[in-house]
Amino acid sequence: MPASNWIWYELMTSDPDAAREFYAKVVGFTFEPWPDPAMAGYTIVKTTAGVGMGGLMKLPDEAAAGGVPPNWGGVVGVADCDAAVAQAVELGGKVLAGPFDIPNVGRYAALADPAGAAFGVMAMASTGEAGPLPEGPGSVCWRELWTTQPDTALGYYGALFGWSESGSMDMGPEGLYRMYKAEGEQALGGVARMMPGQPVPAWLFYFTVASVEAAIEATHANGGKIVMGPHDVPGGGRIAIGIDPQGAAFAVYAQVG
């Protein structure tokens, strides 16, 4: 797997128990405690097929006190964490945490791009390598950056990770929607101008589901809300964007054509 690809997704939430119940019903996730006692309270998030795709943990008190809301974050694999952090800062980003070692996993840092959107980088430990990106129900199929700097964001991530533009769509007053890819990959996601009312630039992750309508019904029935959609997208897909009961944004996608 190229070092410049997404390898992990993580939900930091104010109520882990409620979040597990919500996403099990809306997306079909299953969960398993992290095996290392040193990381007690950290839960592995698995696709419907039982493949680990991310983690879930309680939002740290200091982060909540600093105004950080519950959120989904993404981690990009890199060959050298410290070198990636230095380059991220040189390009205009900033360090939020780290770099630090996670025993038997790798070396990790939390970063923010020049507009303030948060993401992580991880160099895998020599004892293990990241496998291919999971596919199918419960996997992440699209990774979308909502930012105040849509015209320059891909330049930042391109310099940092080697991503390149793979196409664009004219969204009218919102400007161009730019799609990006890693070397040797199909499009991984898109970059769009931040929506009115969105508090801060952020990454949004789309989870594959069997039915968007069923996911919307489950969202409403379990205390969440839908803020956009459902609507059709090119390629025969259908999407909706929601907010979970704790306030974290997420999106769902189903192939219908």
Image (cartoon, rainbow, N blue to C red):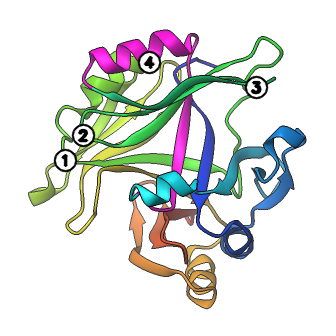
Label 3 amino acid? Answer: Val
The spot of residue 182 in percent (x, y) is 47, 24
**Residue that numbered label 3 is attached to:** 105
Secondary element at image label 4: helix
Instruction: Quadrant for residue 65, please give it.
Output: bottom left
Does 58 lie within the magenta span? no
Residue at left 69%, top 57%?
A: 138
Q: Earlier in the sequence, mark 4 or mark 1?
A: 4
Mark 3: few, some, or many residues within 10 Å (few <14, many ≥20)? some
User: Over which residues does the magenta segment extend?
Assistant: 68-92
**Residue that numbered label 1 is attached to:** 148
Q: Earlier in the sequence, mark 4 or mark 3?
A: 4
**Are the residues at dot 4 and dot 3 in contact (C-beta closer than 8 Å)?**
no
Residue at left 48%, top 67%?
A: 238
**Are the residues at dot 1 and dot 2 in contact (C-beta closer than 8 Å)?**
yes
**Residue that numbered label 2 is attached to:** 115
Residue 162 appears in the rendering: no
Image position of 219 (left or right of 153): right
Q: Earlier in the sequence, mark 1 or mark 2?
A: 2
**Residue that numbered label 4 is attached to:** 85
Label 1 amino acid? Answer: Thr
The spot of residue 4 in percent (x, y) is 52, 21
Q: How many marks?
A: 4
Label 4 amino acid? Answer: Val
